[in-house]
Image: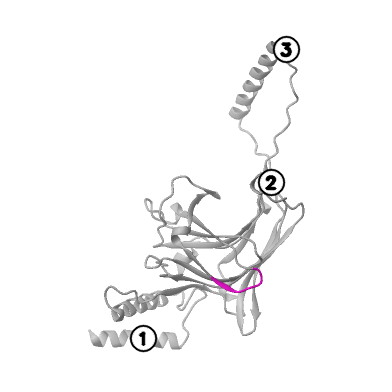
Amino acid sequence: MLLLQQVGVGLVRGLRSRGHRSQFGLYSTSSFGRWAKQMNQFMDQALAGPGTVANTEEVIFQFDREDGRDLRGWRVATDGGIGGSSQADVQVHSEGDGYFARFSGHLCPPFALPVRQKTPEEEAHEAALKAKKAAASEEGGDAQDKEEEEVRLGTAFSVMQTEKGLLQSVINFDLEPFAGLVLRVRGDGRKYIVSLRTENWIVPGAASDDNYQGYIQPKEGEWEEIVLPFSKFLLTWQGKVVNDQTLMNHRNLYSMSFACVGLLPEDKEEKVADEDQPFCLDVQWVKATVD
């Protein structure tokens, strides 16, 4: 057994010394890389002994390459598909001897959402309600007011996200031993949403994943490490917090995203800007932590 431990430790140290890593961490995206990661975790835990967590941190993302390879698998989405005009981009930047990912752009003001075409059943139902209302107005002698078309406002948003299932196709990200995330970030004073898509407790598989959201507000112009416990993430559906909350199953992490979201007039005490607003979030690395 001691010989096996020595061999395993030698292999892992060899991989570490050669910098055998991918854009997602220390190891490559090959089957050998996944085996090396599992071997490393097994040997570290075996050497630490029972009742002790061997690794108190694990790197999930680290944007430290000038060539931009760390951004492979990341993409940007905005409100452009629903009528908005927000713009966003993500690029690798350097500062001193280090590199980081910069997620930046402009959020547009609230905008009118496209009108969804109604089904024949919905049109018939609305016609019946209008006829009933008109008859009630005639009986009461009140003049019928001219109805105006309701305008639904959309919320501006820009998202920096991994492709769905990307993490599972690389390495099985089992975050069960950890209590949360720690992020080294620099912001602009805005609030940002950090989203994690994880495996559903009842129906496993990426087709039935859950989306949990946490919130950070990095200081303007200052690098800081923000701890975001998994217990602070809220289960959401289509961007809204659901009433029946369940604990996050962070054993299988499918994807991650950062989002900058605008607010509608009724959601904000301050005056909503009537022009585009810039935003900027710098991310150096994301780790899982036991603290």
Q: Is residue 90 above or below residue 141?
A: below
To which residue does mark 3 refer?
141
Local SS, label 3:
loop
Coordinates of residue 223 in the picture (x, y in percent): 60, 74
Point out the tag, 3 or 1, that comes first from the N-terminus: 1
Tell me the quarter of the image containing the N terminus: bottom left
Coordinates of residue 77 in the picture (x, y in percent): 63, 58
Tell me the quarter of the image containing the C terminus: bottom left
Q: Nearer the viewer, residue 194 or 25?
A: 194
Q: How is the image coloured?
A: one colour
In which quarter of the view is residue 169 placed? bottom left
Under mark 1, the amino acid is Leu
Q: CA distance from mark 3 to mark 2?
A: 37 Å
Local SS, label 1:
helix
Q: Residue at x 44, y 59 (%)?
A: 231
Q: CA distance from mark 3 to mark 1?
A: 90 Å
Local SS, label 2:
helix
Q: CA distance from mark 1 to mark 2?
A: 59 Å
Q: How many marks?
A: 3
Point out the tag, 1 or 2, that comes first from the N-terminus: 1
Mark seen at residue 11:
1
Q: What are the residue bounds of the magenta stretch?
A: 220-225
Circle 1/circle 2 CB separation < 8 Å: no
Q: Nearer the viewer, residue 50 or 103?
A: 50
Q: Residue at x 65, y 71 (%)?
A: 91
Q: Residue at x 67, y 53 (%)?
A: 156
To which residue does mark 2 refer?
265
Point out the tag, 3 or 2, that comes first from the N-terminus: 3
